[in-house]
Image: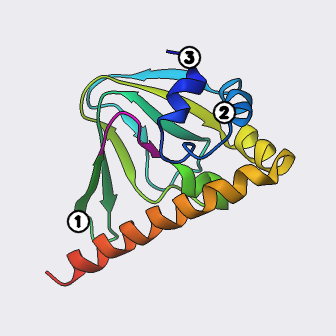
Amino acid sequence: MKDEELLKNVGLFSRLDDKYLKYIAEFCIRRNFKAEDTIIEQGELGIGLYIIISGKVKIIKEFINGEKMEVAILGPGEFFGEMSVLDNTPRSANVIAMENVECLVLTAWDFKSKLKAYPEIALELLPILVKRFRETNETLLALSRI
């Protein structure tokens, strides 16, 4: 399957016109990770946005006191790493491969340059990013009440 077809099946990009999907896909790089590989380490600066083609990852938040909490499990068609790429802050959680994983990676530089070149892309992505933020916020609030 072509990369632009894969992107069309990802919630973050599903609302984009085909011309924008093709444009973004040209800059994606395929990366493979083995089970138990740390794909993203909490506290590091983000180099890219990851889109899962195959396999599963777990998102683990590590707190100052050393406690760890599994925040989510993501699979094909889902994405991670978007927040750090957009706001230039360190990664907020670890991402660990649960099995062999193949991803499309869009570097922060390329992603931001596409958003600047075509602001309409950003307008299509915003509602999806806000939804993701709200879901994460609700999950963390629910966990804090336990």
Residue sticking out furthest to the top = 1
Report the amino acid beneath label 3.
Lys
Q: Is residue 31 above or below residue 39?
A: above
Asked if the stretch drawn in magenta spans residue 79, the answer is yes
Q: Which mark is residue 21?
A: 2
Report the amino acid beneath label 2.
Leu
Asked if the stretch drawn in magenta spans residue 42, the answer is no
Q: Considering the numbered disc 3 on the image, is that residue within a helix, a strand or a loop?
A: loop
Question: Can you tell which quarter of the image residue 86 is in?
Answer: bottom right
The residue carrying pointer 2 sits among few (fewer than 14), some (14 to 19) or many (20 or more) residues within 10 Å by Cα, namely many
Q: Is residue 126 left or right of residue 98?
A: right
Q: What separation in Å lies between label 3 and label 2 (alpha carbons)?
A: 11 Å
Residue 141 is at least partly visible in this image:
yes
Residue 88 is at least partly visible in this image:
no
Residue displayed at 37% across by 44% down: 95
Give how far across and how far down residue 122 sits, in percent: 71, 55
Q: Considering the numbered disc 2 on the image, is that residue within a helix, a strand or a loop?
A: helix
Of the numbered discs 3 and 1, the one sitting upstream in the chain is: 3
Q: What separation in Å lies between label 2 and label 1 (alpha carbons)?
A: 40 Å
Q: Is residue 55 above or below residue 47?
A: above
Residue displayed at 38% across by 73% down: 137
For the record, the magenta segment spans 74-80
Q: Residue beneath label 1, please?
A: 67
